[in-house]
């Protein structure tokens, strides 16, 4: 069971990073190419597609991290590494709830003035890069803990 938790923790966080990387590079590049009004139209029509991918990778990640913390708790060095990995994922989720949920809702509702869309999207993508880095860091920490 411990191996399953480790696999879920590492592959889940790596998949999470990959999904966010694809969103940032593929969709972000596309969004930046659109005129602001067209971006808002696209986001209002299709933002649910982006949201569907997240639970598929977040749920296994959280199960894996919770399980590995439970199963590896007695190993102090690994516990610290796994807590670091969990902290990275929790930071991603906190950023998501604090910034992305309201920002995405504003984009989808077309509540952002057209002249502010470009700046808001630039900020969205810049902070998104931090989320990608945190998810990759969680995966790397998991690999480190497993390889010790």
Image (cartoon, grey):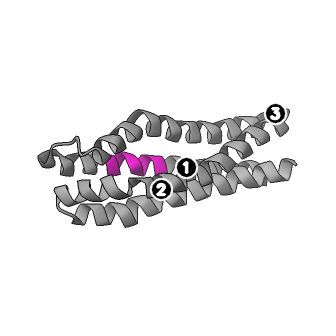
- Across the whole image, how many numbered discs are drawn on residues? 3
State yes or no: residue 125 in magenta: yes
Q: Residue at x 45, y 40 (%)?
A: 96
Asked whether disc 1 touches disc 3, contact meaning CB atoms under 8 Å apart, the reply is no
Question: Which image quarter: residue 104?
Answer: top left
What x and y, as percent, mark residue 108? 31, 47
Residue position for label 1 = 135
Point out the tag, 3 or 2, that comes first from the N-terminus. 2
Between circles 3 and 2, the one closer to the viewer is: 2
Point out the tag, 1 or 2, that comes first from the N-terminus. 2
Residue position for label 2 = 20
Q: CA distance from mark 1 to mark 3?
A: 22 Å
Q: Main secondary structure of the magenta part?
A: helix
What x and y, as percent, mark residue 13? 62, 52
Q: 14 or 109, which is in the foreground?
A: 109
Question: Disc 2 on helix, strand or loop?
Answer: helix
Residue position for label 3 = 73
Q: Which residues are magenta?
A: 124-132
Q: Which mark is residue 56?
A: none
- In the displayed orientation, state which residue is furthest to the front: 45
Q: Residues within 10 Å of mark 2 (few under 14, many from 20)?
A: many
Q: CA distance from mark 1 to mark 2?
A: 9 Å
Q: Residue at x 65, y 54 (%)?
A: 12
Asked whether disc 1 touches disc 2, contact meaning CB atoms under 8 Å apart, the reply is yes
Question: Disc 1 on helix, strand or loop?
Answer: helix
Question: Disc 3 on helix, strand or loop?
Answer: loop
What x and y, as percent, mark residue 66? 73, 38
């Amino acid at each position: 069971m411990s191996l399953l938790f480790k696999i879920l923790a590492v592959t889940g966080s790596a998949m999470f990073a990959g999904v966010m990387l694809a969103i940032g590079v593929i969709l972000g590049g596309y969004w930046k190419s659109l005129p602001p009004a067209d971006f808002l139209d696209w986001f209002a029509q299709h933002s649910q597609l982006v949201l569907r991918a997240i639970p598929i990778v977040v749920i296994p990640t959280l199960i894996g991290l919770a399980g590995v913390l439970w199963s590896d708790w007695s190993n102090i060095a690994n516990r610290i590494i796994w807590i670091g990995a969990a902290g990275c994922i929790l930071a991603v989720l906190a950023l998501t709830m604090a910034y992305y949920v309201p920002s995405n809702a504003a984009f989808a509702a077309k509540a952002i003035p057209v002249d502010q869309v470009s700046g808001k999207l630039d900020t969205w993508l810049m902070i998104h890069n931090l989320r990608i880095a945190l998810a990759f860091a969680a995966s790397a920490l998991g690999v480190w803990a497993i390889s010790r």
